[in-house]
Image (spheres, rainbow, N blue to C red):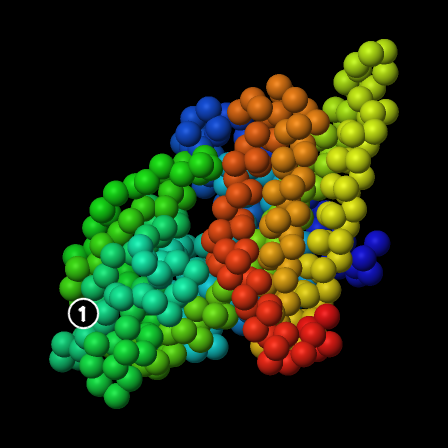
């Protein structure tokens, strides 16, 4: 099905098996605020590396898996079946960095990240600049051979697990004043402090929380600039394209699990002498959920295949937005139906349906809200014509 090669199916099966190892730990993590017993998350990371599921998006020449975009989707789809961020150990370090990294950056960041020895976080979003990255106010100003970085960043996901951050800022002076630049900041660093740690709907554990982090005249050498001054937005866009496709993939996995859960329950739960699967209203919810999952999977897989075939990058930008938009909203609808079919059980935190109901909402928000995705798609339709995008 879906025209997968033997190698594709083998990678898919490996990822599915790993996800199945993690699923039994979901309730333990949920009741512990997202945390696991000491050492268990590290063991899971080692297992992901052993199975070739870690850094699958990174080029082989720097130690990554070198997997195709479709194979990356297959991995992330399967780990999307797991709640509580347990499967985030199948990490995807920044695959956009190797082509622009200096030799020093490659040795200190790229290769260690691909081996799982270093982990990153992104300090990009601000209180007044979420989906509109162009509105950031953080600054970078030259100070001799260094840069001084200042700004307050929101939603710095996995800050407590990271030992370096990507910091995006506007250049305060020089030829590229007002343009964006990206910097590598080792953590911890003087001038970097956590302002507060907001509570969020989903349960992630301390390592993967999203704190507000202040950068106050953080000094970094010019060698920590990624690419050139003025390149910052191009890196952010490439990261967004990749992440939007991976969001779509994880939503497929979540929806698949929810469809399975509600189907099994509907077949067993009896009301009035028969299973509720025989009730027209329940049948409608089951049928709609599977149909939408099939459509979202076809869209996401086809988008990945287009990337592998070298589709124009601006077309990719629109199609990744389409995949994220449809798959994330599809998964939200499926989660809503699953809770409804499961009734009281679906409202219990010990059930996957309740957890996904909370967790899937953010997929319609981060890496650009659904409304932003629609604006991107519509803009490309006007510029290029709908025929080039679909």
The outermost residue toward the left is 144
**Who is closer to the viewer here, 184 or 275?**
275
- Residue for point 57% across, 73% down: 379
Residue pointed to by mark 1: 148
In the image, farthest residue toward the bottom? 175
Residue positioned 30% across, 41% down in the render: 197
Badge 1 element: strand
Q: Residue at x 55, y 32 (%)?
A: 355
Q: Between residues 63 and 290, which one lies in front from this camera angle?
A: 290
Nearest the camera: 20 or 299? Answer: 299
Residue 317 in the image: state x and y as whole percent: 58, 71
Q: Residue 39: x, y in percent?
A: 43, 35
Q: What is the quadrant of the N terminus in the image?
A: bottom right
Q: Is residue 173 above or below residue 138?
A: below
Q: Position of residue 20 (x, y in %)?
A: 65, 36
Residue 309 placement: quadrant: bottom right
User: Is 384 above or below relative to 322?
Assistant: below
Q: Is residue 331 left or right of residue 8?
A: left
Q: Quadrant of the C terminus?
A: bottom right
**Residue 245, picture quadrant:** bottom right
Q: Is residue 153 visible?
A: yes
């Amino acid at each position: 099905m879906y025209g997968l090669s033997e190698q594709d199916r083998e990678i898919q099966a490996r990822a599915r098996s790993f996800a199945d190892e993690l699923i039994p730990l979901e309730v333990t993590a949920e009741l512990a605020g997202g945390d696991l017993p000491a050492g268990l998350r590290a063991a899971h990371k080692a297992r992901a590396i052993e199975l070739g599921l870690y850094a699958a998006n990174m080029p082989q020449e720097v130690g990554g898996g070198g997997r195709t975009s479709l194979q990356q989707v297959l991995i992330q789809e399967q780990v999307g079946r797991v709640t509580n961020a347990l499967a985030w150990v199948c990490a995807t370090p920044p695959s956009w960095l190797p082509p622009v990294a200096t030799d020093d950056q490659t040795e200190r960041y790229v290769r260690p990240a691909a081996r799982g020895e270093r982990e990153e976080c992104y300090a990009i979003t601000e209180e007044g600049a979420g989906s509109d990255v162009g509105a950031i106010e953080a600054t970078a100003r030259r100070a001799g051979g260094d840069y001084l970085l200042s700004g307050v960043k929101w939603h710095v996901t996995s800050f407590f697990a990271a030992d370096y951050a990507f910091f995006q800022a506007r250049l305060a002076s020089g030829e590229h004043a007002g343009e964006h630049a990206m910097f590598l900041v080792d953590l911890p660093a003087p001038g970097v402090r956590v302002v507060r740690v907001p509570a969020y709907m989903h349960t992630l554990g301390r390592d993967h929380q999203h704190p507000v982090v202040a950068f106050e005249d953080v000094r970094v050498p010019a060698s920590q600039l990624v690419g050139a001054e003025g390149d910052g937005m191009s890196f952010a866009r490439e990261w967004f394209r990749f992440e939007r496709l991976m969001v779509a993939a994880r939503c497929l996995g979540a929806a698949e699990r929810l469809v399975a859960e509600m189907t099994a329950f509907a077949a067993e739960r009896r009301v009035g002498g028969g299973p509720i699967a025989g009730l027209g209203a329940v049948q409608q919810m089951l049928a709609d959920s599977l149909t939408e999952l099939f459509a979202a999977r076809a869209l996401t897989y086809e988008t990945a295949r287009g990337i592998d075939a070298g589709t124009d990058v601006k077309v990719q930008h629109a199609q990744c937005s389409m995949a994220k938009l449809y798959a994330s909203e599809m998964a939200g609808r499926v989660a809503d139906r699953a809770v409804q079919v499961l009734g009281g059980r679906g409202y219990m935190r010990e059930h996957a349906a309740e957890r996904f109901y909370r967790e899937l909402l953010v997929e319609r928000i981060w890496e650009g809200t659904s409304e932003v995705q629609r604006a991107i798609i519509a803009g490309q339709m006007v510029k290029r014509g709908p025929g080039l995008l679909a």
